Image: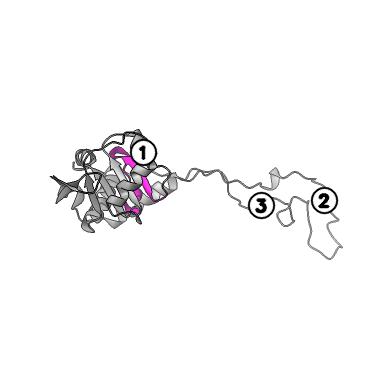
Amino acid sequence: MEVNVLNVSGKETGAKVQLPESVFGIEPNDHAIYLDVKQFLANQRQGTHKSKQRNEIAGSTRKLYKQKGTGGARAGGIKSPLFNGGGRVFGPQPRDYSFKLNKKLKTLARKSALSYKAKDSNIIVLEDFNFESVKTKSYVQLIADLNATNEKTLLVLGAANNNVYLSSRNLKKAKVITADQLNTYDVLNAGKLLLTAGAVKTLEEALAK
């Protein structure tokens, strides 16, 4: 698939870049995408939730009233889960939600997500660029020139660029990452995928094996 390369003003530079079929033109595997997104979201969870069990509640262990003859249910102590302020039965405990996925499956998922974007014509290739200083206004203008103001955008750079990253950080619908940080969730979550020419080359080297 051949795509025109645009500059930061949204104009064609005359150059073209080839998006390799082995990365941007495969038959998408929906189950691989599901597993990779599920792992990504699971890894975001802190897992620090905690409720106190009966043995962790502060309170007396004195028997509340006699065992028999009250007409009510027997009760051993105020820390019983049946009473207000008592311990919780089978409550949440700290845990690790992360799980393992094979590298080949994660690679397949990313290629599947990229193929969906290419199929829907939601990939824009930009020439490698830089901002002279950190200005959110510059990034807003870039997105406007690409006719993507009302869309979520994911800009993938070939290498880290602090000026571009900081210029986009305050924008709710914009995200900037490097090619080695690319993940399936971010690709699918974005309406438009913006790739620099350097990022295309990096992705080809990393995923076209």
Left or right of 50 in this view: 68: right
Left or right of 143 in this view: 15: left
State the residue position of label 2: 63
Residue 202 location, x and y as percent? 22, 38
Q: Could you tell me if the residues under marks 1 and 3 are in contact, i.e. CB atoms within 8 Å?
A: no
Q: Could you tell me if the residues under marks 1 and 2 are in contact, i.e. CB atoms within 8 Å?
A: no
Residue 165 location, x and y as percent? 36, 38
Mark 1–mark 2 distance (CA, rounded to whole Å)? 63 Å
Nearest the viewer among 117 and 66 is 117
Judging from the image, the colouring scheme is: one colour
Mark 1–mark 3 distance (CA, rounded to whole Å)? 46 Å
The residue located at (72%, 45%) in the rendering is 57
Nearest the viewer among 196 and 96 is 196
Between discs 1 and 3, the one toward the N terminus: 3
The residue located at (39%, 47%) in the rendering is 40
Mark whose residue sits in front, 1 or 2 = 1
How many C-alpha atoms fall within 10 Å of the one at disc 2: few (<14), some, or many (≥20)?
Answer: few
Magenta stretch contains residue 181:
yes
Q: Amino acid at mark 2?
A: Lys
* Numbered disc 2: secondary structure: loop
State the residue position of label 1: 165
Question: Looking at the rendered structure, which numbered label has been put on residue 88?
Answer: 3
Magenta span: 172-189
Question: Looking at the rendered structure, which numbered label has been put on residue 17?
Answer: none
Q: Amino acid at mark 3?
A: Arg
Mark 3–mark 2 distance (CA, rounded to whole Å)? 19 Å
Displayed quadrant of residue 203 = top left
